[in-house]
Amino acid sequence: MNAARRKELSKAIDLIEQAKEIISAVAEEEREAYENLPEGLQESEMGEKMNEIADDLEYVDLDEVVDTIQEIIER
């Protein structure tokens, strides 16, 4: 792989790192919004969806993608 393509992949890693930060921030905001709901609303369909979304966002793992790209760059 030539230097130009390695540089492009490095840019992709930077963008993925930015995406990780955005996803983490949104997950935290959604979790806080859910936790600030009254208990009755937390147990509602809307509250359950908010909780599920926060959970799903917290489990998004882009580290493996970054690691794979980094391994490719280093070949």
Image (cartoon, rainbow, N blue to C red):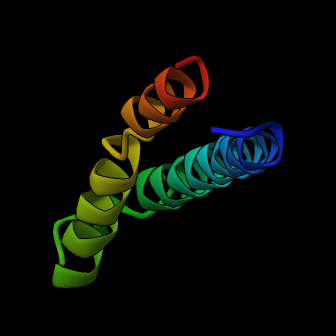
Q: Viewed as shown, does residue 22 lie left or right of 46? A: right
Q: 29 and 70: which one is in front?
A: 70
Q: Is residue 16 left or right of residue 41?
A: right
* Residue 18 on image: x %, y %: 74, 48
Position of residue 36 in the picture relative to residue 26 (left or right) = left
Report which quarter residue 43 is drawn in. bottom left
Q: Position of residue 2 (x, y in %)?
A: 73, 39
Camera-nearest residue between 4 and 11: 4
User: In the figure, 73 relative to 23: above or below?
Assistant: above
Q: Position of residue 53 (x, y in %)?
A: 32, 64
Label count reads 0
Residue at x-position 27% and y-position 82%: 46
Q: Residue at x 57, y 53 (%)?
A: 23
| Residue found at the very far bottom of the displayed protein | 46
Up the image or down, 50 lies above or below 55; here it is: below
Q: Quadrant of the N terminus?
A: top right
